[in-house]
Amino acid sequence: MAVLSLVAPVCLIAVAIVATGPINTLCLLGALGCLSLILILAAKAWLRYKLPSPSQKSIGFFHPFADSGGGGERVLWCAVRAIQDAHPEYQILIYCQAGSTPQALCARASAAFLLDVNATFQVVPLTCCHLILPETYPRWTMLRQALGSIQLAYDGLLQAVPKVMVDTSGWAFMYPLFRLAGCRVASYTHYPTISTDMLQRVTSRQATYNNDVAVAGSPLMSLVKVVYYYIFAAAYGAVGGCTNVVMVNSSWTRGHVSRLWWTFTQPLLVYPPCNVSHLAALPLDRKLKSLFLVSLAQFRPEKDQAKQLRAFAMARQRAAAQVMHPDEDSSHAVLAARLKVVGSCRNHEDNERVAQLKGLSSELGLDACVDFCVNAPFSEVQQLLGGAVGGLHTMVDEHFGISIVEYMAAGVIPIAHNSAGPKMDIIKTDTWDRVGFLCETEEEYARAIFEVLSMDQSKRMGIAAAARRRASEFSDEHFKDGFLRALEQGLLPPNVHM
Ligand SMILES: *[C@@H]1O[C@H](CO)[C@@H](O)[C@H](O)[C@H]1NC(C)=O
Ligand SMILES: *[C@@H]1O[C@H](CO)[C@@H](O)[C@H](O)[C@H]1NC(C)=O
Ligand SMILES: *[C@@H]1O[C@H](CO)[C@@H](O)[C@H](O)[C@H]1NC(C)=O
């Protein structure tokens, strides 16, 4: 993309040279350059006149829906706590939906994430948050949301201008405004607004969720749409270039951001914090009399627990075939092991899926060695993680896979699907110390299950210990260090008391 956005102007210049001659082109370019410079300076002067001047010791966090309880909000609150701990001299401003007080936001963070946030920050209320909701715009949604976000940012800046603005919501089109207002800008991007995958999809005219059938069917509409997406992507890249520090939450997002944004440095990968401290405290050794595997996932179709049952049955068949040899301890271990399928059911469909899985388990002859633990309480899940030797994960293309990090923190060896998050971010198999297994086919899963169950204790503990070390890279502390280090690259003075 970055290449493409260079190619387009070069082509335009070439056309201008051919059409009007080199001298005229040079004059034209000079005029354009002066005009943009004048516009930027005028905008800057106007903003300086309209907006309050930046207060030196303040950090703003732009997060319109700070009162919800999703993964993005956990990142926000952990980041706020990091600043409170390391830079107490800075005043923190949270730009969010009007109607929230610091006390209410802290109570929410504590209820949703068990996080204690000190209510010493200020809230800058934003009154027009509906401007960034996709529901507001049936057509040209991305463009109008982007414009809405600029208006929202302006509304916030009219009330206060911080020295450093941290955007944790991903609204990149605000960045030029922040810069013109005199802030330094750090962004933490979870998900790019537009991705190169999306561009490919519109270019190849596939009908998908954001590309409806009428558009995919008509060549003219498709052309308009392709042009719209490319211009939008170029603009997204340009505004992304207005940041001083770029952080991303995963390798996948890093790939897209570094391809699209006009930045010179590689975005910093700062994994979102997971609270695994309670799991990391569990002992690593396991009772060898009752080996078991665990599978932790909601009972949703894409989690594909059926594959786990079939792979487990296959591993047992293999063990049964080998058990004829008199001194085959490992096969006995596999035959004696159990599989505990743990998960929550949200509705009737989920309950039906559990019934189907139980049916499959009987069909495979696994009744005596598979347990279903539906809606088990937290303490029981923790106990199961503390006892299991291996953990199964079969979802294809999962963005992250927090259950895998939980396995690893608890000392359970993960056997996960070889795609997306588990492959790119969690289970690195290129290092010499193995932390888990990545599989695709049922045979591969069966082989990994056999290996984990028949492994001798010292080898298993070695892998479990390496897995736990790797899981600590997703901990709250690791996030705090990464986040502060990124901001201290020029935006904040390095902290001396750390
Ligand atoms: C982490 O989780 C444990 C147990 O659920 C909880 O007691 C603790 O307060 C949490 N800590 C953070 C920082 O979220
Ligand atoms: C909150 O921060 C203030 C000022 O930094 C400090 O005096 C106070 O002890 C903190 N409160 C808690 C509960 O940490
Ligand atoms: C990054 O954020 C996206 C969007 O919230 C999420 O789907 C993905 O799982 C996150 N990745 C990591 C590594 O947490």
Image (cartoon, rainbow, N blue to C red):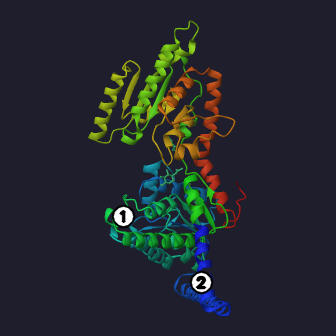
> Residue shown at 51%/47% (left/top)?
400
Instruction: Find residue 244 and report its horizontal and vertical position in percent.
Output: 63, 69
| Residue identified by numbered label 2 | 15
Residue drawn at x 43%, y 73% is 143
Viewer can see residue 117: no
Please name the amino acid that badge 2 sits on: Val
User: Mark 1 is on which residue type?
Assistant: Ala
Question: Of the residues tagged 2 and 1, which is closer to the observer?
Answer: 2
Q: Which mark is residue 216?
A: 1
Residue that protrudes farthest toward the left in the picture:
348
377 sits left or right of 422 in the view: left
Question: Going by the image, does 350 lie left or right of 320?
Answer: left
Residue 208 in the figure: left or right of residue 401: left
Report which quarter residue 238 is drawn in.
bottom right
| Label 1 neighbour load within 10 Å: few <14, some 14-19, many 20+ | many
Which residue occupies 39% across, 69% down? 222
Is 487 located above or below residue 435 in the figure?
A: below
Q: What kind of element bears circle 2? A: helix
Can residue 93 be seen here?
Answer: yes
Of labels 2 and 1, earlier in sequence is: 2
Q: Quadrant of the C terminus?
A: bottom right
The x, y position of residue 32, in whole percent, is: 60, 89
Depth check: give the residue in front, 317 or 62.
317
Which quarter of the figure is the N terminus placed in? Answer: bottom right
